[in-house]
Amino acid sequence: MSTEKYVVGVDYGTLSGRAVVARVSDGAELGSAVLDYPHAVMDTKLASSGATLGPDWALQDANDYVAVLKSAVPAAIKDAGIDPADVIGIATDFTACTMVPTTINGTPLSNLDEFRNNPHAYVKLWKHHAAQPHADRINELARERGETWLSRYGGLISSEWELAKGLQLLEEAPEVYNTMHKFVEAADWIIWQLCGTYVRNACTAGYKGNLQDGQYPSREFLGALNQDFAGFAEDKIANTIGELGDRAGGLTAEAAAWTGLPEGIAVAVGNVDAHVTAPAAKATKPGQMVAIMGTSTCHVMNGDVLKEVPGMCGVVDGGIISGYYGYEAGQSGVGDIFAWYVKNQVPGSYYEAAAAQGLTIHEYLTNLSAEQEVGEHGLVALDWHSGNRSVLVDHELSGLMIGATLTTKPEDGYRALLESTAFGARKIVETFRTAGVPVEEFIVAGGLLKNKFLMQMYCDVLQLPLSVINSTQGPALGSCIHAAVAAGAYESVDAAAEAMGSVSKGVYQPDPERGKKYDRLYAEYEILHDYFGRGENNVMKRLKALRREASNA
């Protein structure tokens, strides 16, 4: 056995799961492997039956998550070239809020013959937005009753979260709801599979389950939504809370066989992909906002004051790092919007030209976009193709592009969409500042880091120094840091972050002249943001309603 010790971090994303092996002493990433989920995201049809899913559905099969443990973890160990006996801990992170309805022993209900073809028995992925009407009812009732916990979520809770998804499950599939023993965050479910113990992590309990000051929303409140929902919190989601970085248990013999790791090693309490990334980027102090940019973007930061930020996804004591209030906000669509555009709005001739230059279509369009002056395309867009997570918290909203003419080209629209996501990020930053939570540094992690033009655009739009995490696998490295703490190698997540995290400071510096030009475009974005997003014109919601009516006809 080596004197060096190692840990494994597994990052569960929207489309795949990736395992990373890191050295405990310095966080060096020695090996990695990825598995694309066999069932991917089921958002149009249910894989088991081919049944059509309604608008705004997004499901997954929990068996795919175990497949990652069986495939990616052994492959990452092999890629690292280390002895598995030298691994002392494993930790995972997950997209959230992603919910698994289970039996008493943790079996997903979709594995049961009686529910195999019932969509409600499957995992509801974070971007399952079909519970928006239920979220609207929850928000309305909470405002009417003056529920004190609502302000901790910026005055609105999301259709992505546990209460809305649980209420939808009860009212649309009571047979599934009544059979379900627990409605489990996937972040906790995978830990259950690894160590045999169900421990609810403090992060998702606070941000996604509305646990504040040790209390969930009351039976009276939940029962007022639906009398059969009164016991939801205590019966379906409440469980022992584990703090971030704690040991949830030891690796079971079965999980050891799946992964090739030693039985009994530390399994850390579960965590969320965004929140776990902050330590990997050494962003553990107030004023540092971390944006994990991929299919969506999650913005997290620590604060030493408790403030109510309009439209934030939540503020939780110790939600990221012990000793600070952890704040969260986010954008429901970023990379997903760019992917939609190139798939549906770009002609074949552009793909041919990109291939001739040895570029991806994204690289080709980015290069064309970069040749333009700010505002040259004459467009402005709203980044709501997957709804708005912050600061409006409304998934009934939809995308918009204005200014198109008969001379508008594909690269014009592409750049306008890139800019729209930067404007959405600026809206979040300015909202935090106005509420009394300073944002002094913007740190980026995630797959979109590789687009240097996009990074400079964000820097110019935000007029903030932009730092970048040095790891291409920020969440997985963050999980490795938590695994090291759970295994006892470090006394705290903060200490482990200092040793194992890695960030390059101020890689991008704002250009004041471009910033002034972006200010003019952002002013137009703000007008559209408020006009369509704050109730002055509800055309987006009316169109969504028409779509649902037509789909159900």
Image: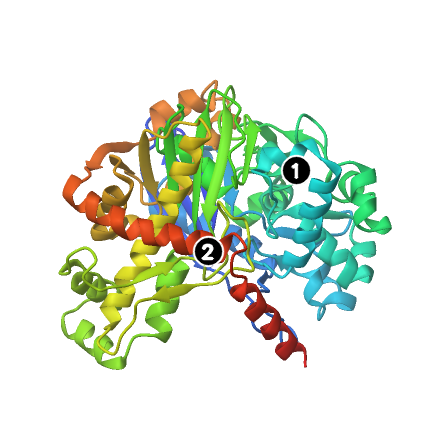
Mark 2–mark 1 Cα distance, whole angstroms, equals 30 Å
Identify residue type, mark 2: Tyr
Q: Earlier in the sequence, mark 2 or mark 1?
A: 1
Question: Crowding near pointer 2: few (<14 within 10 Å), some, many (20+)?
Answer: few
Q: Percent from the top left, x then y, of residue 402?
A: 34, 66
Q: Percent from the top left, x then y, of residue 465?
A: 24, 34
Residue at far right of view: 227
Of residues 106 and 235, the one nearer the viewer is 235
Q: Percent from the top left, x then y, of residue 219?
A: 82, 38
- Up/down of 492 relative to 449, above or below: above
Q: Quadrant of residue 544?
A: bottom right
Residue at far front of view: 536
- Up/down of 171 relative to 472, above or below: below
Would residue 548 be visible to someone looking at this image? yes
Residue at 60% in and 43% down:
156
Image quarter where the N terminus lies is top left
Viewer-side label of 2, 1: 2
Q: Give the residue pinned by disc 1.
A: 210
Image quarter where the C terminus lies is bottom right
Q: Give the residue pinned by disc 2.
A: 531
Residue at 37% in and 26% down:
287
Is 362 situated left or right of 330 in this image? left
Residue at 27% in and 74% down:
405
Q: Please, what secondary structure does the residue beneath circle 1 have?
A: loop
Would residue 21 be visible to someone looking at this image? no
Is 492 situated left or right of 3 in this image? right
Identify residue type, mark 1: Asn
Of residues 285 and 104, the one nearer the viewer is 285
